[in-house]
């Protein structure tokens, strides 16, 4: 069940990040991957910065979205270079 929740959070976070960054979508699977990788980035970065958004699903979506935005910005910078 937790895998399904992680996929749904990844989907929502990837879609939100794509809307915020406006770099063109990556499709359903791409958005899920971007959201899940964003979640991993946020779960690594936020504790080091002393940031906690709570343990509920809304906090997970927000942190995964922020991580996905960071990922998309880095990918955009690499793509331009």
Image (cartoon, rainbow, N blue to C red):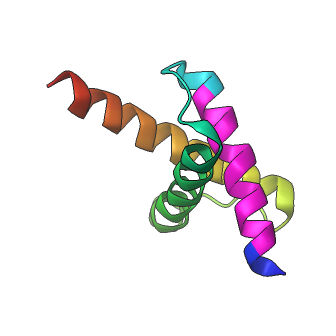
Task: Identify the image quadrant of the N terminus.
Answer: bottom right
Image position, residue 18 (x, y; %): 59, 30
When asked about the image quadrant of residue 54, the answer is bottom right
Main secondary-structure element of the magenta-colored stretch: helix
Say which of 42 and 18 sits in front: 18
> Residue 13 lies in magenta, yes or no?
yes
Q: Looking at this view, is 74 or 27 the one in front?
A: 27
Residue at the location (72% across, 67% down)? 6
Quarter placement of the C terminus:
top left
Left or right of residue 75: residue 40: right
8 vs 41, left or right, is: right
The residue most toward the bottom is 1
Q: Position of residue 62 (x, y in %)?
A: 72, 47
Q: Which residue sits furthest top?
A: 22
Task: Write down the quadrant of residue 2 in the picture.
Answer: bottom right
Number of callouts in the render? Answer: 0
- At x 53%, y 45%, the residue is 68
Does residue 75 appear in the picture of this structure? yes
Image height of 74 relative to 48, above or below:
above
Task: Inspect this view and state whether residue 60 appears.
Answer: no
Nearest the eye: 21 or 31: 31
User: Residue 72: percent from the left, percent from the top?
Assistant: 44, 36
**Image point (80%, 68%), residue name:** 5
Q: Which residues are magenta?
A: 4-18
Residue shown at 68% from the left, 36% from the top = 15
Q: Position of residue 70 (x, y in %)?
A: 45, 41
């Amino acid at each position: 069940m937790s895998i399904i929740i992680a996929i749904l959070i990844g989907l929502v976070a990837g879609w939100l990040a794509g809307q915020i960054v406006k770099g063109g979508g990556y499709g359903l699977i791409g958005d899920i991957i971007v959201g899940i990788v964003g979640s991993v980035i946020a779960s690594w970065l936020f504790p080091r910065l002393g940031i906690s958004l709570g343990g509920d699903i809304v906090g997970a979506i927000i942190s995964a979205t922020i991580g996905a935005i960071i990922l998309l910005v880095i990918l955009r910078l690499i793509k331009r270079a």
